[in-house]
Image: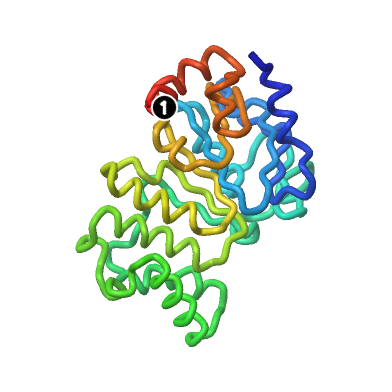
Amino acid sequence: MKTVNSERSRFVNMKHPLLHVENIRQYFEKTVALADISLDLPEGEILTILGPSGCGKTTFLRVVAGLQRPDYGTIEIDGRTVNGPGIWVSPQKRSVAMIFQNLALWPHLSVKRSVELGLKEKGLRKAERAYIIGETLERLGLSQKSECFPHTLSSGEQQRVALARALVLRPRLLLLDEPFSHLDWELRQDLTCLIKGLETTIIFVTHDQLDAFAMEGLLAIMRKGRLEQIGKQDEAIKNPATEFVQNFVRKAASLLRG
């Protein structure tokens, strides 16, 4: 088996990564939530972070998004330091959008109004907002649902609204926290295809091995706040870095091998 450090080093210090994370640590009282997380993510790539519940996946997303400040470490987005010694850039100025597990859709706002909220905060003119919203809803198959309210939408449609709300902001980095947790397998497949076609740099977090391998791209395995392995997906199956990785991806490996 390869060591965790040797595997990780292949994906650290890449040339001009969109996201650079170095030695991120996060503590909650005496609990270690994140332990020296380091990784580089190239522009246009999808990184799936796979791990059991409570391993630190969501905490990592929140730290990257700027929703909480780590106790130690450096984060750079598109060559700009957004977190480091004496440096802190607010979430609104990071060019990052995050979709939460509970979606957080306003029940009293139509699809169009919900998607428009972020654009209003950016100060865009009405005509420009309308163009961006129309283009995004069309792209996600929501044009006919623009005046509908969340309670009238299917689970898949609600997920697309949350995605549209993020994409209209034109983020450099899109963070997805367990986006398929309440969807059936058919909807998961549809949204997986949609996400893979976005041509956006994405970090996708899940506890489900099959969802992780369906997403393709790069794969990181997390356990107890640490990255056990990071690299190409097939490496986790063919050359697991630790016994935990080997056991955790076994279900997906058996299905992929038929």
Q: Would you place residue 150 above or below residue 131 in this image?
A: above
Query: Residue at image x 73%, y 22%?
Result: 6
- Tell me where residue 29 appears, x and y as whole percent: 56, 25
- Tell me where residue 107 appears, x and y as whole percent: 28, 62
Q: Residue furthest front?
A: 258
Residue 159's image quarter? bottom left
Query: Residue at image x 43%, y 59%?
Result: 163
Numbered disc total: 1
Report which residue position mark 1 lands on: 252
Residue 211's image quarter? top left
Instruction: Indicate the amino acid at tag 1.
Output: Ala
- Tell me where residue 191 appears, x and y as whole percent: 38, 52
Helix or strand or loop: what does disc 1 sit on? Answer: helix
Residue 52's image quarter? top left
- Colour mapping: rainbow
Q: Residue furthest bottom?
A: 127
Identify the image quadrant of the N terminus: top right
Query: Residue at image x 48%, y 39%?
Result: 205
Foreground pick, 241 / 117:
241
Foreground pick, 154 / 70:
154
Residue 35 appears left or right of 224? right
Foreground pick, 194 / 131:
194
